[in-house]
Image (cartoon, rainbow, N blue to C red):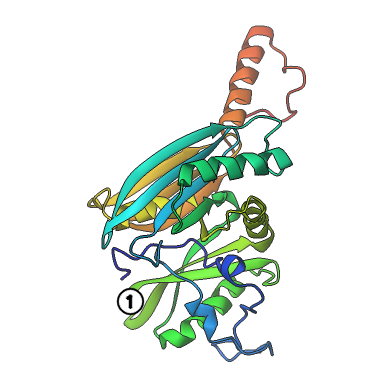
Amino acid sequence: MARVNDISSTEKLLDLIRKKGHDARPAASPTGENPLPPPPLKKSVKRSFSFKIASSRNAINVGVDIGHEALRMVRMVRTSPGKWALTGYETAPLNRETRRGTPEFISLLKSELTSFCGSEKNINIWAIMSAANVSVRHIRVPKIAKSQIENAVFWSVKKETPFNEKETLLDFEILEEVVEEGVPKWLVMAYTAPSREVQEIRGLFSKAGMPLAGISIVPFAIQNVFRTRWIPAMEGNVASLFIGNDFSRIDIYSRGNLIMTRGIKAGINSMVESLLWRRCRAATGRRPTGSRERRPP
């Protein structure tokens, strides 16, 4: 089982941030069926990722969320093993001139982070990426040597949901040992994300002169809250519901671990549209001008 002070880094998508150029494809299929002939997996791949937020005892961690309307920043410091304290929080509004990707946004990002971080040198900056673009799944693989698990996870995920490893980053975390029909297996949480988006986020901070230490998603951030016991893990399951402008998500946690996450392609905008549609239809008996042909749910 993952230790309480082990913090998921979201992807180990961090290879793109910390070290470029590795081939994440394992060397052969663990089942022995039609193995592909890619180059051998580098021994340094797994060690290049970390489940801990900070490697230094005195490091300060700054989290950044680039929203539609605001840039949000939080600052945390580790007070003791497994214990963290919130030491700062700020919000900077965004507008059309400072929308994401523009030179004005880069300038804003640099100035706000510089002011927020102050003169501290030992800082790890983490950014949030959209969970809508990260696929999370739980799989079970044979209880093989941990050195072979990366290989097994790759082929298991590839079989369930084929993906292009040149365009997708894959990471996983071993949760615990389980028994299935008398056979011991590893329960693994695996996640994939488009490398292009990771590169784009990394590029924003690099241009601002504030290189990232890691990238995460909100479901994993909430999981970290449970694992570090900021909020004691409750008996039974805990559900978290997020409703965004165009996307919503429900996450289920058990014993501090994320066990299910589901995205919904609907949000506040579709709710507003549906309410306006029904109100206009009730008042006039006609479909509102400019609305979709299909009746909202």
Q: Secondary structure at mark 1?
A: strand
Q: Is residue 19 visible?
A: yes
Who's the residue at 57% across and 69% down the image? 18
Judge left or right: residue 139 versus residue 39.
Answer: left
Judge left or right: residue 215 versus residue 237.
Answer: right
Tell me where residue 236 appears, x and y as whole percent. 26, 52
Tell me where residue 141 appears, x and y as whole percent. 45, 79
Judge left or right: residue 80 versus residue 6.
Answer: left
Q: Quadrant of residue 224?
A: bottom left
Q: In this view, which residue lies farthest toward the front?
A: 119
Q: Quadrant of residue 183?
A: bottom left
The residue that mark 1 highlights is 177
Q: Quadrant of residue 192?
A: bottom right
For the C terminus, give its image quadrant: top right
Who's the residue at 57% across and 39% down the image? 67
Marker count (numbered)? 1
> 80 or 158, which lies in front?
80
Tell me where residue 104 appears, x and y as whole percent. 70, 38
* Badge 1: residue crowd in 10 Å (few <14, some 14–19, many ≥20): some
Tell me where residue 34 appears, x and y as whole percent. 66, 89
> 190 or 102, which lies in front?
102
* Image position of 186 with respect to 131: above or below: below
* Image position of 35 with respect to 48: above or below: below
Q: In this view, which residue lies farthest toward the top?
A: 283
For the N terminus, give its image quadrant: bottom left
Residue flagged by tag 1: what amino acid is it? Answer: Glu
